[in-house]
Image (cartoon, rainbow, N blue to C red):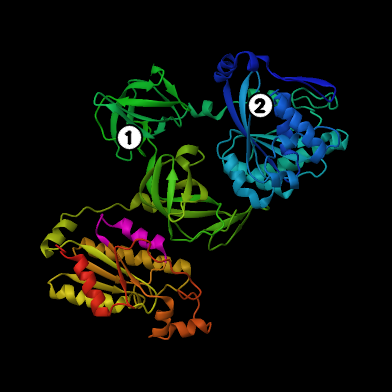
């Protein structure tokens, strides 16, 4: 328990915390939870406001308060008064610069509700951090410095708030004490913001004049501004409707997180209900399979329920034994979501390295994870003026609209209808780093009109006729390493062994199928994607396909491997040091690249990513082409 005197006021925390912590936690357990963010331009007072909320809700303990008083005198910006921003700006760099860099999450509670607040950075270069903080928020407090009015970052963050689907917005005109609580200035700011908000589709927001530092209109109505007749901030936060209440009115959607099977007598499907209400006896449909059943019971750790609603984590049991696994979505039988593999989306790029169109990334949506490629953006959005600009890629903090193709259909809904089934992240397959967040708009019409045509003669029949097992022998290595020569020798040997083969050579393919592609990173990726698709079709015809391509990037080689059944993709690394390959320079390409006459040449001004664990490795410094080919065939046998 804290009894500390600050600014001539006795500061006392809840006695129940010290006397009976279990009772204190039980009281808070049954309160509703509001997640909200504070955002706006640099130095609009976001951290100070949160510090004031923590202070006024009596959530600061004696040791914290003593440290705050000491830090305020040593590094604060408010003279002898408490600098509430120091409660939130936890990073040393933040305190030194007086700005917020990372997203800071803080918990506090009042008698009516619990809160988790995210203090989001104001600087433009930390936009990705702001998006992270806003992704789970029910409400946004957009702060404006009353002295400065609506700024570029105000517009930027308002657009992001709208983009991320936050429906409850508070426009907090802060630092009213520094303009003598002038109503005319406040009204002018609200009028200007309203015009901008309407232009980007924000049709409703709550405006209020506040002073985070002085506490005006935070917990109580300010006597300094009798002209303001609305609620103070805390009262508004306590009474605003939560998103999960609105979500309960929507059709049932529950992504399956886990198949719960503790013994042979129980089988249930666990997850968080994204939208809707479910009861025993309700008819459901499991997607993407489309199989139907009814709910037999709803199970939780505390026992069975007669009803479960959006926001609850439960285990659902079916009346029938139908297939359902992690990544599937349990939905209302008569109102299921869509299933598709091609979409238009808005993407917020959060990685330092730019988007590479055509490269395969992991796409995670709800509990579904699939391989996906992003096409070149249709446009990017200049959030300072909402202008649409042409772009070939997405750089750090860029926001663009682009088409996404997944390797298999996924269950989704537009983000505006369902954040869980419409919001996704992209993950780099090599580094496992999250590189983007995105929102699905709709499935592309071509995805709905193009269907797979079943045929009676399948790949197994083609392979049986040829008396062999199909494979793709993928030769990769630097230019001049000997890939084509060795692949040719391998094919000759296989031909003598009565194997049905076909060799796809990098140079030959560029005379026809890929003659429209250059040598930029994007074109190289598309080159390999097309070759991979052709090689897969040939393997489906029962052939052993040999490909000789530099294929410099691991991600694209892995993409082709993922197209094939397990064991049918063989990565062969023709390992030749750059110096040796350059010394050979049979085609004179290295000489041109060194002279600057040939751009984007692998090994010179474009990278080569060698295989980390190739299926077969040959060293052409130690082996002749014939010896390398013999070694490869020996490793491959038998090929039946």
Residue at the image point whose x is 84% and y is 38% from the top: 185
Number of residues whose C-alpha sits closer than 10 Å to that of mark 2, classed few (under 14), some (14–19) or many (20 or more): many
Q: In which quarter of the image is residue 39?
A: top right
Q: In the picture shown, does residue 553 fall above or below 26?
A: below
Which residue is outermost to the front? 622
Circle 2/circle 1 CB separation < 8 Å: no
User: Which mark, by number, is residue 367?
Assistant: none
Gap in Å between the C-alphas at discs 2 and 1? 37 Å
Which residue is outermost to the right? 180
Per the image, the residue denoted by label 2 is 237
Per the image, the residue denoted by label 1 is 286
Residue at the image point whose x is 83% and y is 26% from the top: 227
Residue at the image point whose x is 81% and y is 30% from the top: 214
- Where in the figure is residue 419, as x and y percent of width and height? 50, 38
Q: In which quarter of the image is residue 189?
A: top right
Residue stretch rendered in magenta on the structure: 553-569
């Amino acid at each position: 328990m804290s009894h500390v005197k600050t600014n001539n006021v006795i500061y006392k925390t809840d006695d129940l915390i010290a006397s009976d912590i279990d009772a204190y936690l039980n009281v808070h357990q049954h309160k509703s939870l509001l997640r909200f963010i504070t955002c706006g331009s640099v130095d609009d007072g976001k951290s100070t406001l949160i510090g004031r909320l923590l202070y006024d809700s009596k959530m600061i303990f004696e040791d914290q308060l003593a440290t705050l008083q000491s830090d305020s005198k040593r590094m604060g910006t408010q003279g002898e008064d408490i600098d509430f921003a120091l409660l939130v700006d936890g990073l040393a760099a933040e305190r030194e610069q007086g700005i917020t860099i990372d997203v800071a999450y803080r918990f506090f509670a009042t008698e009516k509700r619990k809160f988790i607040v995210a203090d989001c950075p104001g600087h433009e270069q930390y936009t990705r951090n702001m998006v992270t903080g806003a992704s789970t928020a029910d409400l946004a407090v957009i702060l404006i410095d009353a002295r400065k009015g609506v700024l570029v970052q105000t517009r930027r963050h308002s657009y992001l708030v709208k983009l991320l689907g936050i429906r409850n917005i508070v426009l907090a005109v802060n630092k009213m004490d520094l303009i003598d609580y002038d109503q005319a200035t406040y009204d002018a700011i609200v009028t200007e913001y309203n015009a901008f908000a309407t232009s980007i589709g924000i049709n409703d927001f709550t405006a209020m004049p506040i002073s985070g530092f002085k506490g005006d209109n935070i917990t109580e109505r300010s006597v300094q501004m009798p002209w303001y007749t609305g609620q103070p901030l805390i009262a508004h936060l306590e009474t605003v409707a939560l998103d999960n209440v609105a979500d309960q009115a929507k059709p049932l959607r529950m992504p399956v997180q886990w198949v719960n099977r503790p013994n042979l007598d129980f089988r249930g499907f666990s997850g968080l209900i994204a939208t809707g209400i479910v009861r025993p006896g309700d008819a459901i449909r499991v997607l993407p399979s489309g199989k139907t059943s009814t709910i037999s019971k709803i199970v939780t750790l505390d026992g069975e329920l007669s009803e479960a609603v959006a926001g609850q984590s439960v285990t659902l049991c079916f009346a029938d034994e139908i297939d359902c696994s992690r990544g599937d979505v349990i939905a209302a039988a008569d109102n299921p979501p869509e299933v598709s593999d091609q979409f238009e989306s808005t993407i917020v790029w959060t990685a330092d390295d730019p988007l590479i169109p055509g490269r395969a990334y992991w796409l995670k949506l709800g509990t579904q994870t699939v391989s996906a490629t992003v096409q070149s953006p249709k446009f990017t959005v200049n959030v300072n003026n909402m202008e649409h600009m042409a772009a070939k890629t997405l750089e750090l903090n860029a926001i663009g609209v682009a088409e996404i193709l997944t390797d298999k259909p996924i269950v989704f809904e537009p983000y505006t209808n369902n954040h869980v089934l419409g919001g996704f992240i992209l993950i780099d397959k090599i580094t496992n780093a999250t590189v983007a967040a995105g929102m699905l708009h709709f499935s592309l019409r071509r995805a709905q009109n193009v269907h797979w045509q079943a045929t009676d003669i399948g790949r197994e029949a083609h392979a049986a006729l040829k008396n062999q097992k199909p494979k793709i022998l993928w030769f990769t290595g630097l230019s001049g390493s000997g890939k084509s020569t060795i692949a040719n020798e391998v094919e000759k040997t296989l031909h003598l062994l009565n194997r049905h083969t076909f060799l796809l050579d990098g140079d030959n393919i560029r005379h026809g199928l890929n003659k429209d592609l250059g040598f930029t990173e994007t074109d190289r990726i598309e080159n390999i994607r097309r070759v991979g698709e052709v090689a897969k079709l040939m393997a489906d015809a029962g052939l052993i396909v040999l490909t000789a391509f530099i294929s410099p990037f691991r991600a694209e080689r892995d993409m082709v491997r993922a197209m094939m059944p397990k064991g049918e993709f063989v990565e062969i690394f023709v390992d030749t040091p750059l110096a040796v390959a350059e010394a050979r320079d049979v085609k004179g390409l290295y000489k041109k690249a060194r002279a600057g006459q040939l751009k984007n040449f692998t090994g010179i001004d474009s990278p080569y990513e060698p295989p980390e664990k190739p299926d077969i490795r040959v060293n052409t410094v130690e082996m002749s082409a014939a010896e390398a080919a013999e070694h490869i065939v020996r490793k491959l046998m038998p090929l039946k």
